[in-house]
Image (cartoon, grey):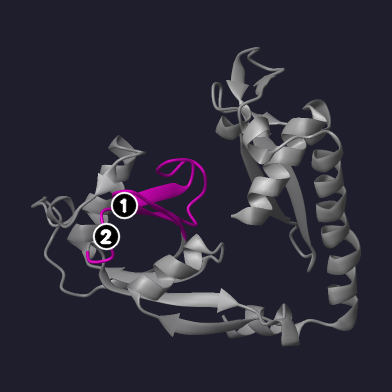
Amino acid sequence: MKKHINKFNLRCKEVNSEEARIAVMKGRPCLSTFKLDKKEWYNFRKFFNENPKGILTKKILEKPNNEPINSNKTGHAVVLTSIEENNLVFLNSWGPSFGDKGYFRIENENVLDSMKFMDVFFLKSDLKKEEIDYYEKYHLNFIKQSSKFLTENNISIKDLENKNEKCYKCHYSNSFKKFKLKIIQNHKKNDDNDYRTMKVICPKCGKELELSKISNELRLYLYIEDIVN
């Protein structure tokens, strides 16, 4: 954490589970750590191998198995990425073949032993002048242009979310509000630079769509939704 927060001029602090939930709902990822013994690790892996989208509970984790008893616990780090109605969603580091394409769900923060959370954030005072200037020039300019487009064409966000778009891959039509904007963070080996790309996820086939191949109205709607949320 110290290595990366200094590299990207970020801050971090340990928070409780409620503060972690609030941070994630505001769009900030939370580093999370926990510890399991050998029997618990066996149940952890087995459950998500058999139930990729399942919700792990304390009862399932502690289910008796044939693994030898070992009181020593080993730690692991994951990232809390979202809060769903009845569970917490984490991104693991074992690749897309694990769980739900690399993600897994637990009932609550009490399922995994010794769970801790680290909020990662920055303050406006941490930003360089050129970073603030870039934000104001490009991000705020986009908001202004979007507002102008909506006003001139007498269109509201509610109007947009009820419009339909046909996926160019599966050819099914769905309302704008069902499409999702996905931000992909890429990092090349031996390269200090991160590369961010955006894709749109079709609610029917689940495939990634190129921004250049969807309507400008859908693209605008997804951008605005991402900014608001």
Where disc 2 sits, the SS reads loop
Label number found at residue 108? 2
Q: Quadrant of the C terminus?
A: bottom right
Q: Amino acid at mark 2?
A: Asn
Q: Amino acid at mark 1?
A: Asn
Label number found at residue 87? 1
Q: Which residues are magenta?
A: 81-110
Left or right relative to 95: residue 10 = right
Where disc 1 sits, the SS reads strand
Q: Position of residue 142 (x, y in %)?
A: 85, 53
Residue nearest the observer in this picture, 50 or 15:
15
Residue nearest the observer in this picture, 116 or 82:
82
Q: Whole-Å distance between the Cαs marked 1 and 2? A: 6 Å
Residue at position x 68%, y 32% in the image: 160
Label number found at residue 8? none
Q: Position of residue 105 (x, y in %)?
A: 34, 50
Residue nearest the observer in this picture, 95 or 25:
25
Establish if 228 lies above or below 37: above
**Crowding at label 1, few (<14), some or many (≥20) Cα neighbours within 10 Å?**
some
Residue nearest the observer in this picture, 140 or 198:
140
Residue at position x 50%, y 57% in the image: 93
Is residue 191 found inside the magenta-colored segment of the image? no
Q: Residue furthest left?
A: 64
